[in-house]
Amino acid sequence: MSIRVKIMIILLVIGVITSASITGYNYMEAQNRVFEDAYVKAELISSFAMASREYTKKTMRPLATQLAGEESFHPELMAGFYVVRSIADIFAENQKGYTFKQATLDPILPENKSDAQETEIINYFNANRKTKIQKGIMNKNGQEFFYVARPVVNKVGCNRCHGRREDAPKEQLAKYPNSGGYNWRVGDVVATMITYVPLDATLARMNTTAMKTISAGLASVALLMLVTWYVMSKLVVKPLVHLTELAGDMSRGRGLDQEISGARNDEIGALCDSFNRMRKSVVNLIKIVKQKGD
Ligand code: HEC
């Protein structure tokens, strides 16, 4: 195998490894940034939802109760979970893909029912009561999401409406005729407040960037190989081939009188000079041998 080919192989291997490592490292860094960013967004959305719930509890509910009477039931004004869900629905219309859900094992409102993945999270919260937050990546119907989930614990006061069905406010029963959302046990994690941030567009952008980085890396390797091939040919291979031809000729007794000029201030030049000295020595030796023979 020729020197040039060997060097090309070395360059190719180093180039491919370097390009792949740089791309991989950049990708990991970008991924971390995307997840951090998604986490911040999810936290903002969920803080806003919590704030809406607090406002309902502290301001709207007392006022609504005062205006409409103790026995009245207007979840639109009184139930924090109702208010949060309604705000979240409007929010999701404007921010496609972002979802805030009160995923519940056994909900009053069927659309709050937890799916298989959310049920798993709620079960995990129930089994690990110290865990107050869960976050990660989730694939839903082929789409990637970052999620942040928090447990919702059923308290004594909640059972005014979520305890025995027959004890719940009449208007609630009239408005929600389903049988779900009752007989919740006090102290159980019954639901999770979960926020989804869509990742698909960002991941697609990351993949494009990774493809561009690796393409640029490989193009640079190709350019480097091309330049090296040319320089190697000009500076090393051609002079060596020429010297080999001269040596071949000399071994057959031809071209001994031809001056070989290094004319270059490098290793090849030095080799030419040595070669030239050797040629002269050979010529002298031949002369001496001839004189002795005469
Ligand atoms: C005044 C009655 C009332 C009280 C008190 C109440 N809820 Fe609810 N809750 C409701 C109603 C009605 C809904 C359905 C809201 C909707 O339509 O989105 C609901 C919905 C929920 C949901 C969403 C899942 C579902 O069932 O649709 C969760 C979770 C929830 N409540 C938890 C609680 C917790 C925890 C407490 C106590 C801190 C509590 N609720 C107190 C009436 C109540």
Image (tube, rainbow, N blue to C red):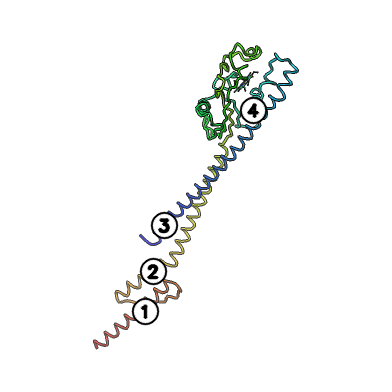
Q: CA distance from mark 2 to mark 3?
A: 21 Å
Residue at numbered disc 2: 240
Q: Are marks 2 and 3 in contact (CB under 8 Å)?
A: no
First in sequence: mark 2 or mark 3?
Answer: 3
Q: Mark 1 against mark 4, which lies toward the viewer?
A: 4
Q: Is residue 32 above or below residue 135?
A: below
Q: Residue at x 46, y 64 (%)?
A: 231
Q: CA distance from mark 1 to mark 4?
A: 91 Å
Quadrant that contains the N terminus: bottom left
The disc at residue 10 is 3
Report x, y in % for residue 247: 33, 73
Q: Residue at x 58, y 32 (%)?
A: 196
Element class at badge 2? helix
Report x, y in % for residue 275: 36, 76
First in sequence: mark 3 or mark 4?
Answer: 3
Q: Nearer the viewer, residue 61 or 268?
A: 61
Residue at numbered disc 4: 88
**In the image, ligand 1 is in what quadrant?**
top right
Q: Nearer the viewer, residue 262 or 45?
A: 45
Residue type (three-letter) at the residue carrying disc 1: Arg
Residue at numbered disc 1: 277
First in sequence: mark 4 or mark 2?
Answer: 4
First in sequence: mark 2 or mark 1?
Answer: 2
Q: Is residue 62 above or below residue 219?
A: above
- Counting other residues with Cα less than 10 Å from the Cα at mark 3, is it few (<14), some (14-19), or many (20 or more)? few
Residue 164's image quarter? top right
Q: CA distance from mark 2 to mark 1?
A: 17 Å
Q: Mark 3 against mark 4, which lies toward the viewer?
A: 4
Element class at badge 1? helix
